[in-house]
Image (cartoon, rainbow, N blue to C red):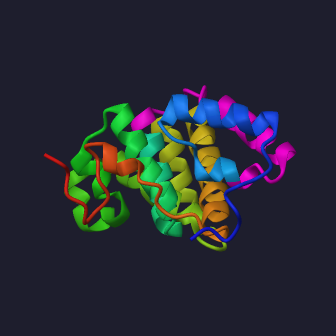
Amino acid sequence: MARISLTPPRTPLLRLLEWYSRRSYGKVLDVGLVLGHHPRILRGVFGFENKVSRWNELDPELKHLAVMATAAKINCSWCLDFGHWTADQLGLSPEKVSKVPVWRKHRESFTDMEQLVMEYAEAMTESGPTVTDEQTSRLIRHLGEPAFVELTVMVALENFRSRVNSAVGLTSQGFSESCAVRPPGQAVAE
């Protein structure tokens, strides 16, 4: 149960967000309703997210695995739910994505680079990041500096998203119910 009302004042900005959200995601994002209580933050966050969606130096699958590993580390059920829906939209392997929260038990399902990216995401997410010089140099060597910077900012952004959503009490909104990629423990509808 959300710790803040999901019924912010019905401003023109909120109505625009609701229209865009229904058109893009099939439903209104609860996080948008939370941020709707502070229109300047709503405008700033969604403006930034719009710009982030155009970044393209990092392979989309690696980016998504980093985001999912971050959300799993923080245990943000809303972010994991939305992440499964996003993975489905990207056409990612349902089997692989469902294993991200417990990827270390399923190393054979991930390439060395994917494991390195998820390990880096988790290290960045620790309270008091535990990123090592060795992780950084390996990632830069394999990805290049622009993609490494994008990876780092994406993990930091997902830390922001997951921590906000968890702090305000957002939980799964049912996005993963409509796709082939399911969180662990949920069967895929036949």
Q: Do we see residue 131 in this rendering? A: no
Pick whichever, 91 or 35, lies toward us.
35
The answer to whether residue 142 is above or below residue 185 is: above
Q: Do we see residue 47 in this rendering? A: yes
The question of residue 130 being in magenta is answered with no
Q: Relative to 70, is 190 on the left or the right?
A: left
Question: Which contiguous range is marked in magenta?
Answer: 34-61
- Percent x, y for residue 112? 32, 50
Quarter of the image that includes the N terminus:
bottom right
The answer to whether residue 1 is above or below residue 21 is: below
Pick whichever, 32 or 60, lies toward us.
32
The picture quadrant where one finds residue 22 is: top right
- Percent x, y for residue 127? 64, 74
Q: Relative to 13, is 126 on the left or the right?
A: left
Please name the residue shown 64% across and 52% down the image. Answer: 31
The question of residue 56 being in magenta is answered with yes
Please name the residue shown 65% across and 45% down the image. Answer: 153
The answer to whether residue 176 is above or below residue 51 is: below
Pick whichever, 159 or 143, lies toward us.
159
Q: Relative to 187, is 18 on the left or the right?
A: right
The answer to whether residue 85 is above or below residue 185 is: above
Please name the residue shown 80% across and 54% down the image. Answer: 37
Pick whichever, 2 or 101, lies toward us.
2
Q: Relative to 74, is 183 on the left or the right?
A: left
Number of residue marks: 0
The picture quadrant where one finds residue 145 is: top right
Residue at the left extreme of this rendering? 190
- Percent x, y for residue 29? 58, 46
- Judged by its main secondary structure, the magenta piece is helix
- Percent x, y for residue 50? 66, 31
